[in-house]
Image (spheres, grey):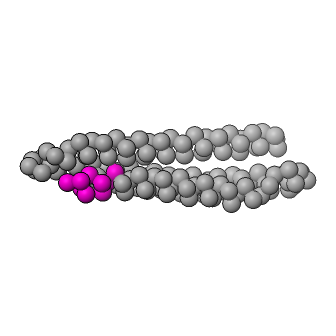
Amino acid sequence: MLEHLHNHITKELEQNTKTDTIFILTAIILNLITLAVNSGMVEKSRTEKSSLMVMFIFVVLIIVVNLVVVIGLLKGRQTRVKLTNGLIAMYRDQNVSKYYDETLLANYNVRYNLFLMVVVCTGLIASVVPFIMR
């Protein structure tokens, strides 16, 4: 039963990693595509109000998607901490905890903060740069 539980927790951790990866890539790709589209529309937006409205709609999309991604990453971090703490408790109970360095939890936390920073920064750049160019 213990082995089954261990496998279940590690599979949950793998799923968590895949989900986080999808969130991060989606946000960054959307931010870069929107940056390119809005930058391409700058010239038209000076004379056409509809182009300016489209630029603002894309900014709203960036904000919504990035907000979802940030919330998803924060929940992913919480989930990883809970699952990893469960593994550590299991390892302690089985007297094998010396093989798992608990400082990895702090490393995971830093990694999540870096991912969040990349998502937020690319979102801000994608939102602001086209309007500065305008």
Q: Does the image show residue 52?
A: yes
Magenta stretch holds residue 128: yes
Q: Nearer the viewer, residue 5 or 53?
A: 53
Residue 9 lies in what quarter of the image? Answer: top right
Q: Nearer the viewer, residue 48 or 63?
A: 48
Residue drawn where x is 25% and y is 57% of the image = 132
17 with respect to 125 (left or right): right
* Residue farthest toward the right in the current orientation of the protein: 95
On the image, the x and y values in percent for residue 57 come to 24, 50
* Residue farthest toward the left in the current orientation of the protein: 47
Residue drawn where x is 60% and y is 43% of the image = 17
**Magenta stretch, overall SS:** helix
On the image, the x and y values in percent for residue 96 come to 89, 51
In the image, residue 126 above or below residue 8: below
Residue drawn where x is 68% and y is 56% of the image = 107
**Quadrant for the C terminus in the image:** bottom left
On the image, the x and y values in percent for residue 23 come to 48, 45
**Quadrant for the N terminus in the image:** top right
34 with respect to 42 (left or right): right
Residue 7 lies in what quarter of the image? Answer: top right
Total count of labels: 0
Residue drawn where x is 26% and y is 46% of the image = 39
On the image, the x and y values in percent for residue 75 come to 55, 55
Magenta stretch holds residue 62: no
3 with respect to 84 (left or right): right
Q: Does the image show residue 75?
A: no
Write the start and end of the magenta stretch as one range. 126-134
* Residue farthest toward the front in the current orientation of the protein: 133
